[in-house]
Image (cartoon, rainbow, N blue to C red):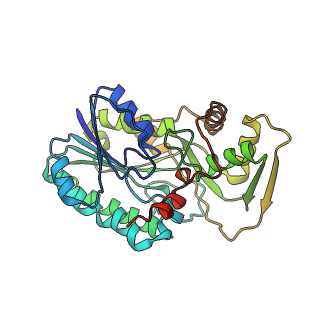
């Protein structure tokens, strides 16, 4: 594994992952729309391509010579997807099929797909494992599940596919998102002096961005027989939204911080088991949710997050509305 292509490499995850790949000695190619600005620094082993994964001619030109692909690009999460469902489907699903076909034809050895733990839907069991049936509740999660199904069908001895189902990622990134549970609550605690939560009983599994990006790097190095055609949940601990609010309050050392609980119709609750990836790959998160809060606090104090309440680049929906993505 020498030449790595990362779709969506200038996004929230990619902005942390790509520098790690470069530090690891890889040659990296990024295909991204750069809707959120230029966050990756120039590097002699980095090629940045402003382009659309729906452009098959672009893919046919840029994928050959790639050893492994990490596919991050998508319209991320339910609210962003629902902003324009037909557009989102063209990016999240329609573009996926030729992307995989071109990769396979170009003799890419390894294809790592960022799915989502939301594909399970709402389960009553306290331990949601990879062998449970998928019951996606939204179009976003439904098409993630369909992409998984298609990708598994393409697995061969020469084309190794790996599917990861991450929990919600949290923590600081140069392409920061402030529309994710831990990040939202931390932002409001620091800049509003108050946390407002809806319901609070819903479980929201999270994982620190440093752990998630470390796993992608590790997945490039693992023997293919350990990962070929495998699916792994990737999470840390399953906390309720109210518990996350308390973690934010504790790590900011703000005993006076007010937590306001309001009623909600959104009762989606996700709780996943990450025992399989620990057992089979030896992967365990090293960073806590509390550390993500502290990392964000430090970034605020260092002036790395200007205008957090008003700048649309921190919010996927607002950015998509502003650029009128088509």
Asked whether residue 140 is in view, the answer is yes
Residue positioned 59% across, 49% down in the render: 178
Q: Which quarter of the figure has residue 109? A: top left
Residue positioned 39% across, 69% down in the render: 87
Q: Is residue 266 above or below residue 227?
A: below
Q: Residue furthest bottom?
A: 86
Residue 35 locus on image (x, y percent): 42, 53
Q: Is residue 14 above or below residue 241?
A: above
Name the residue nearer the viewer: 311 or 159: 311
Classify the position of the N terminus by image quarter: top left
Residue 114 locus on image (x, y percent): 39, 51
Horizontal relation, residue 310 to residue 326: left or right: right
Name the residue nearer the viewer: 202 or 227: 202
Asked whether residue 136 is in view, the answer is no
Horizontal relation, residue 199 to residue 181: left or right: right
Q: How many marks?
A: 0
Classify the position of the C terminus by image quarter: bottom left
Residue 291 locus on image (x, y percent): 62, 34
Q: Is residue 127 above or below residue 299?
A: below
Residue positioned 54% across, 52% down in the render: 272
Residue 266 locus on image (x, y percent): 65, 68
């Amino acid at each position: 594994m020498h030449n790595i292509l990362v779709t969506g490499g200038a996004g929230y995850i990619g902005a942390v992952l790509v520098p790690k790949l470069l530090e690891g000695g890889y040659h990296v190619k990024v295909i991204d729309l750069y809707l959120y600005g230029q966050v990756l620094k120039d590097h002699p082993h980095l090629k940045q391509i402003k382009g659309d994964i729906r452009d098959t001619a672009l893919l046919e030109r840029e994928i050959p010579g790639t050893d492994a692909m990490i596919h991050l690009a998508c319209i991320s999460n339910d609210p962003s997807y629902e902003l324009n469902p037909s557009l989102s489907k063209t990016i999240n699903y329609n573009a996926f099929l030729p992307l995989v076909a071109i990769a396979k034809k170009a003799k890419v050895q390894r294809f790592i797909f960022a799915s989502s733990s939301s594909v399970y839907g709402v389960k009553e069991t306290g331990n949601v494992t990879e062998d449970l049936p998928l019951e996606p509740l939204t179009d976003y999660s439904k098409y993630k599940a369909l992409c998984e199904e298609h990708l598994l069908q393409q697995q061969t001895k020469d084309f190794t596919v790996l599917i990861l189902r991450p929990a919600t990622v949290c923590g600081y990134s140069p392409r920061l998102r402030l529309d994710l549970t831990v990040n939202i609550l931390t932002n409001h605690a620091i800049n509003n002096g108050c946390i407002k939560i809806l319901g609070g009983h819903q479980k929201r599994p999270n994982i620190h961005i440093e752990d998630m990006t470390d796993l992608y790097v590790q997945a490039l190095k693992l023997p293919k027989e350990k990962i070929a055609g495998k699916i792994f949940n990737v999470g840390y601990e399953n906390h309720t939204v109210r518990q996350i609010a308390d973690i934010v309050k504790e790590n900011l050392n703000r005993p006076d911080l007010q937590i306001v609980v309001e009623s909600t119709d959104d009762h989606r609750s996700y709780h996943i088991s990450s025992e399989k990836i620990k057992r089979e790959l030896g992967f365990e998160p090293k960073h806590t949710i509390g550390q993500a809060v502290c990392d964000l606090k430090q970034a605020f104090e260092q002036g790395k997050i200007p205008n957090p309440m008003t700048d649309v680049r921190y919010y996927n929906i607002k950015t998509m509305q502003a650029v009128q993505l088509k």
